[in-house]
């Protein structure tokens, strides 16, 4: 029913194609204007750096300033998505959130809590096993400033990604394909491939895409099984927020005033595969037991039909 909600509103293919181009790609270009201006100011001030070297560009700014500049495009994209859905599709935005009449934020909190706990355990465990891979990076005032920036802007960033991939595109592709598995796989691949320009991929290699695509698939599965984004929103926000607060590295997309700094050489280790092939399946099992998920084949691979046809078949 989550995907089939789109049938109630304007759902022609061109609206989704144009919507994605305008909202996602447009916001990235327009949202890049502030950082372009900031870089231009640095150049006028006489700073010498190679524009083609993203690491040199990263180092131009205070980490807190750079964090804000990096997250501005997502805030603009979120606003653009809300307006596009309401004005062009004439669709209430909450229909991207859930197929249910009431929104269950307790689910979001549960997913956030469980993944925040797992992330903290993994980071602290790695710090205990390999203390030489980390240096203490904590400075109270910069950390507190970063904390308030992060708790405001990170949920907007992760919310934008969830609403456009697991919400907007999941529904749009689903009503055109007439099934659930095409949007599930399609949005997972697109989500992963759009991270291809992340610094982590540049340093680790394309094997890092296993993590991004696998995470997209996991988030898509829990969205379809739960008929909404509550769990995906909680998980994704915990993943980005806790990571930003706990640990940074010179080769990651977010350069922050975190508690720890990873100084190890970037490599493709088991930390890429363990979440995708072990922890995510276990989390799906936990969610399934807690929320009583049934009808797996239908919810993940079944047909998507207009609500009136569904009622006639019943």
Image (cartoon, rainbow, N blue to C red):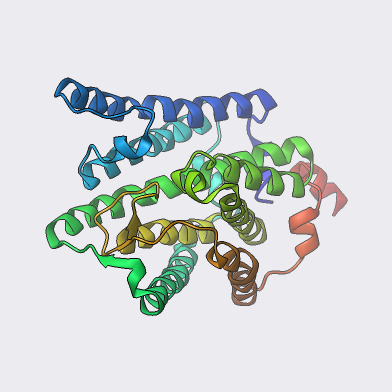
Give percent across and percent down for residue 92. Answer: 52, 39
Pick the residue in front: 28 or 97: 28
Asked whether 112 or 94 is in front, the reply is 112
Residue at 34% x, 40% y: name it: 55
Left or right for 176, reference 11: right
Towards the viewer: 295 or 116: 116
Which quadrant of the view contains residue 120? bottom left
Task: Residue 96 in the image: state x and y as whole percent.
Answer: 55, 45
Query: Which quadrant would the C terminus be assigned to in this image?
Result: bottom right
- The number of numbered badges drawn on the structure is 0
Residue 173 sits above or below residue 151 on the image = above
Q: Is residue 252 left or right of residue 177?
A: left
On the picture, is 139 further left or further right than 282?
Answer: left
Q: Residue at x 55, y 64 (%)?
A: 269
In the displayed image of the protein, which residue is found farthest to the right? 313
- What residue appears at the point 20 percent right and 64 percent down from the top-left corner? 138
- Does residue 143 lie above or below 82 as drawn? below
Image location (x, y in percent) of residue 13: 69, 27
Locate residue 270, reporting x and y percent.
57, 67
Front residue of 156/303: it is: 156
Q: Residue at x 39, y 28 (%)?
A: 52
Residue 102 in sight from this viewpoint: no
**Residue 132 seen in the current view:** yes
């Amino acid at each position: 029913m989550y995907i089939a909600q789109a049938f109630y509103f304007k759902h022609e293919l061109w609206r989704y194609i144009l919507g994605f181009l305008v909202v996602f790609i447009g916001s990235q270009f327009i949202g890049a204007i502030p950082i372009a201006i900031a870089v231009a100011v640095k150049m006028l001030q006489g700073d010498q750096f190679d524009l083609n070297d993203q690491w040199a560009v990263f180092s131009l700014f205070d980490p807190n300033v750079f964090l804000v500049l990096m997250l501005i495009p997502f805030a603009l994209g979120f606003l653009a998505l809300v307006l596009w859905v309401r004005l062009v599709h004439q669709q209430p935005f909450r229909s991207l959130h859930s197929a249910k009449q009431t929104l269950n934020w307790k689910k979001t909190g549960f997913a956030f809590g469980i993944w925040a706990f797992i992330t903290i355990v993994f980071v602290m465990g790695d710090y205990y096993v390999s203390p030489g891979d980390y240096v203490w990076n904590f400075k109270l005032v910069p950390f507190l400033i970063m904390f308030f920036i992060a708790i405001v802007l990170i949920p907007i960033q992760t919310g934008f990604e969830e609403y456009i991939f697991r919400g907007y595109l999941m529904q749009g592709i689903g009503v055109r394909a007439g099934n659930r598995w095409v949007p599930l796989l399609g949005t997972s691949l697109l989500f992963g491939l759009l991270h291809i320009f992340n610094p982590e991929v540049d340093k680790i290699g394309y094997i890092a895409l296993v993590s991004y695509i696998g995470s997209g698939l996991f988030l898509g599965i829990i969205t379809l099984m739960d008929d909404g984004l509550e769990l995906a929103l909680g998980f994704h926000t915990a993943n980005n927020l806790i990571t930003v607060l706990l640990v940074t590295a010179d080769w990651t997309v977010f350069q922050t005033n975190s508690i720890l700094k990873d100084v190890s050489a970037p490599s493709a280790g088991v930390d890429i595969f363990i979440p995708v092939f072990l922890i995510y399946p276990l989390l799906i099992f936990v969610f399934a037991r807690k929320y009583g998920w049934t009808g797996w084949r239908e919810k993940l691979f079944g047909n998507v039909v207009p609500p009136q046809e569904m009622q006639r078949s019943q």
